């Protein structure tokens, strides 16, 4: 069975819990650990869900907040249901002619 894996990046939550409300507050803390990132890079790291992150950056973040990777990244996985076919759909309306409205006839009263 196929599984769908999702993750939640929780860096902004960790920063807020520590009282760091500006993304730029993280720059000197990362620099102390040998990680040099620009302001836009730090902004994206905090406010967006990253697709690729260096393990050195994850290790530095975990050291800054005294947490483990499981606190920084929450992973959920669920089984994916198979595709439904349109052959047994119960919400399909049968277009039977007896259910359709009757065509209106216009009668001319002058004749």
Image (cartoon, rainbow, N blue to C red):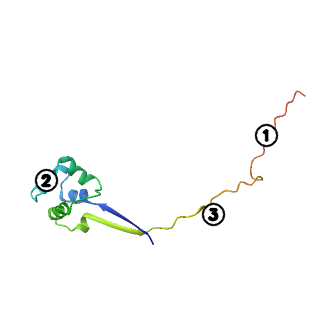
Image: 59 above or below 93:
below
Please report the residue visible at 45 percent of the width from the left and 72 percent of the height from the top: 1
Q: Secondary structure at mark 2?
A: loop
Residue, far bottom:
1
Give the residue at mark 1. Answer: 104
Give the residue at mark 2. Answer: 36
| Mark 2 and mark 1: Cα distance apart in space | 77 Å
Query: 110 or 93: nearer the eye?
Result: 93
Query: 72 or 31: nearer the eye?
Result: 31
Left or right for 52, reference 3: left
Query: 16 or 5: nearer the eye?
Result: 5
Mark drawn on residue 12: none
| Label 2 or label 1, whichever comes before in sequence order | 2
Image: 28 above or below 81:
above
The image quadrant of residue 54 is: bottom left
Q: Position of residue 5 (x, y in %)?
A: 37, 66
| Label 3 or label 1, whichever comes before in sequence order | 3
| Mark 3 and mark 1: Cα distance apart in space | 34 Å
Mark drawn on residue 87: 3
Crowd around label 3: few <14 · some 14–19 · many ≥20 (10 Å): few
User: Given this view, does label 2 or label 1 mark the residue nearer the observer?
Assistant: 2
């Amino acid at each position: 069975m196929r599984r769908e894996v999702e993750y939640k990046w929780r860096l902004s939550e960790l920063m807020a819990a520590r009282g760091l409300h500006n993304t730029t507050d993280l720059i000197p803390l990362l620099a102390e650990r040998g990680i040099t990132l620009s302001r836009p890079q730090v902004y994206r790291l905090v406010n967006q869900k990253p697709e690729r992150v260096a393990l050195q950056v994850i290790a530095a973040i975990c050291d800054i907040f005294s947490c483990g990777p499981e606190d920084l990244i929450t992973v959920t996985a669920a089984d994916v249901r198979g595709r439904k076919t349109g052959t047994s759909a119960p919400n399909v309306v049968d277009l039977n002619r007896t259910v359709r409205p009757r065509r209106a006839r216009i009668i001319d009263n002058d004749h």
